[in-house]
Image (cartoon, rainbow, N blue to C red):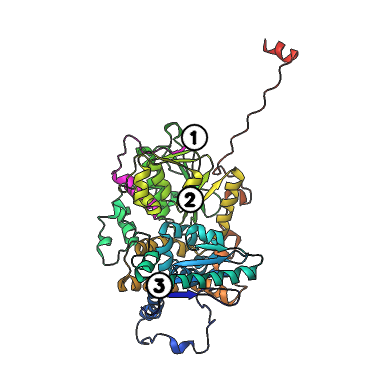
């Protein structure tokens, strides 16, 4: 082609701050908008208006040219999506450079522009960011795989200039290569994207909702729930201590808009035996019926093992086990595992269904016995099938190594670090719209498992059109045009997501992993002490 390389830079303080909400558009913007049939239903009009954005980012992501960008400032929303369509990204190492995934605070569970983000970093890692509207700096952007090189300099201005110059220089170097050589270097578009499509979870593969041209994963969730032999407790007893019959699993509310699951069969290494599976499955069923009531779920375990694999009475292909793993993967709230001790076999699969794992530095992950099927697909979706097959031969990984692989989001050295991270997540979730978070996982699963075509682009546009009609969305967007306005889900004290120790009258939370007490130094023997011992 005539153009072999595209270099994108920006002037001013920002690269791209996202979509233009709240009327922040040019006066002649209407001249370039899509023509809408005024007689069409409101939903169809909204879909028509959304399609150009969906098509634009599809075209940007699949451009045959090699795309280089030098970013700057805080990028948000569609700005992050634009950055993710690039094959190579330079980021200046400044205090203001970063990526902010704020869609959930705007009551959006998904955006048509996320095509590049999902193809660049994958659905599991994206979930860990977007469900809590998280933010990362330039180095964090490199760690998650959106930024390729962080540029350091004596000052912020110098770093931005250096990043721009490096982008231009790299573009010139790439332009001297042959088309075949350029194609091998691309990280986006056909042949360049390294992220594989998500496999359909084992238990979902026979579901009717997967037979549609575009799979409907919310319908899949409902279908799996309808097939469960378990039903959970009746509505009045849900999320309470009443009528809970499982000794191996403790499940209850803690704090505010928060629930805790505690694995209690420490003598058996918290194995996924039949009793443990039934307890966790009942908890999952109740949580799927508690949208908005629980916005954060924390999971931890007693004893020296978080989960040491399968019990003898639960084979890998067991239907209840597969239902459990899938329903945890699709829980309509942010799920965080607080992990200490050994995690083995299907314990790794269970942890891989969480949105985030905070692991103490002593944690070891053992992969023996896992395959890419029968629940192992939740692990391979994070690390890839070849890596899982290699690890399943008997390898083990430390917490830090697991973090590098994307299985752990944070390695904590102390109880205080765990406590601070739980507080951080609660603060982030308090600013997020509950309906948006609850709807995010099915949409991400649908798009992440589908080859993008016009039907998938329309699915994305249809989803956003429906979200725009939710009063929660209108309430959230009002906060952009009226800075003093607080959305209902973040307006009152009782709306906040709080850990147990932050609730008035609450105590130090038992859910936090306890530091092991230091052994007391032995007293030196004296004549008096010896006489007592005798």
* Residue assigned mark 1: 304
Q: Report the mark closest to the observer, 1 or 2.
A: 2
Label 2 Cα crowd, 10 Å radius (few <14 / some 14-19 / many 20+)? some
- Residue stretch rendered in magenta on the structure: 304-330
Q: Report the mark closest to the observer, 2 or 3.
A: 2
Q: In this rendering, is residue 216 above or below 462?
A: above
* Residue assigned mark 2: 404
Does label 1 or label 3 sit earlier along the sequence? Answer: 1
- The reply to whether dot 2 and dot 3 touch (C-beta < 8 Å) is no
Does label 2 or label 3 sit earlier along the sequence? Answer: 2
> Which SS class for mark 1?
loop
Query: Is 454 left or right of 366, judged from the image as shown?
Result: left
Image quarter in which the N terminus is found: bottom left
> Which residue sits furthest front?
176
60 or 275: nearer the viewer: 60
Image quarter in which the C terminus is found: top right
Toward which corner of the image does residue 452 lie, by quadrant? bottom left
* Magenta stretch holds residue 434: no
Q: Residue at x 39, y 40 (%)?
A: 276
Query: Is 460 left or right of 434, judged from the image as shown?
Result: left
Q: Position of residue 490 (x, y in %)?
A: 57, 64
> Which SS class for mark 2?
helix
């Amino acid at each position: 082609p005539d153009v072999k390389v595209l270099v994108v830079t920006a002037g001013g303080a920002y690269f791209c701050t996202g979509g233009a909400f709240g009327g922040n558009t040019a006066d002649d913007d209407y001249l370039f908008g899509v023509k809408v049939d005024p007689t069409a239903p409101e939903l169809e009009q909204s879909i028509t208006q959304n399609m150009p954005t969906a098509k634009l980012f599809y075209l940007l992501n699949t451009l045959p040219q090699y795309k280089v960008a030098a970013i700057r400032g805080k990028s948000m929303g569609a700005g992050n999506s634009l950055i993710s369509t690039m094959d190579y990204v330079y980021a200046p190492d400044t205090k203001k450079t970063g990526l902010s995934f704020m869609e959930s605070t705007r009551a959006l569970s998904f955006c048509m522009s996320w095509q590049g983000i999902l193809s660049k970093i994958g659905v599991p890692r994206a979930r860990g960011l977007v469900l809590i509207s998280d933010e990362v700096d330039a180095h964090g952007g490199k760690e998650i795989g959106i930024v390729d090189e962080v540029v350091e300099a004596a000052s912020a201005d110098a770093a931005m200039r250096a990043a721009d110059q490096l982008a231009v220089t790299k573009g010139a170097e790439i332009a001297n290569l042959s088309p075949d050589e350029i194609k091998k270097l691309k990280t986006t578009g056909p042949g360049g994207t390294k992220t594989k499509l998500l496999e359909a979870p084992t238990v979902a593969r026979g579901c009717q909702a997967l037979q549609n041209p575009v799979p409907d994963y919310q319908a899949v969730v409902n279908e799996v729930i309808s097939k469960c032999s378990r039903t959970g407790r009746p509505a009045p007893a849900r999320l309470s201590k009443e009528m809970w019959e499982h000794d191996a699993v403790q499940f209850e509310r803690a704090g505010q808009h928060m629930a805790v699951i505690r694995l209690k069969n420490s003598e058996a290494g918290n194995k996924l035996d039949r009793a443990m599976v039934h307890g966790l499955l009942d908890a999952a069923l109740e949580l799927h019926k508690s949208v908005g009531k629980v916005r954060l779920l924390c999971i931890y375990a007693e004893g020296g093992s978080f989960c040491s694999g399968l019990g003898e009475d639960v084979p890998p292909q067991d239907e209840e086990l597969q239902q459990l793993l899938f329903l945890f993967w699709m829980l309509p709230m942010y799920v965080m595992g607080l992990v200490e001790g050994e995690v083995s076999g299907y314990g790794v699969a269970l942890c891989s269904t969480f949105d985030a794992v905070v692991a103490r530095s002593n944690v070891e992950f053992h992969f023996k016995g896992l395959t890419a099927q029968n629940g192992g697909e939740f692990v391979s979706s994070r690390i890839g099938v070849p890596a899982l097959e290699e690890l399943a031969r008997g390898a083990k990984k430390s917490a830090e190594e697991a973090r590098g692989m994307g299985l752990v989001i944070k390695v904590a050295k102390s109880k205080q670090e765990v406590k601070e991270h739980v507080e951080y997540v609660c603060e982030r979730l308090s600013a997020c719209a509950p309906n948006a978070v609850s709807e995010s996982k099915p949409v991400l699963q649908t798009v992440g498992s589908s080859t993008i075509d016009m039907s998938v682009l329309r699915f994305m546009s249809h989803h956003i059109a429906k979200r725009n009609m939710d009063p929660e969305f209108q309430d959230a967007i009002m906060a952009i045009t009226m800075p003093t306005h607080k959305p209902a889900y973040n307006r009152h004290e009782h709306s906040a997501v709080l850990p147990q120790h932050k609730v008035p009258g609450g105590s130090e939370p038992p859910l936090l992993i306890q530091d092991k007490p230091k052994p007391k130094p032995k007293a030196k023997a004296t004549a008096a002490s010896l006489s007592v011992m005798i």
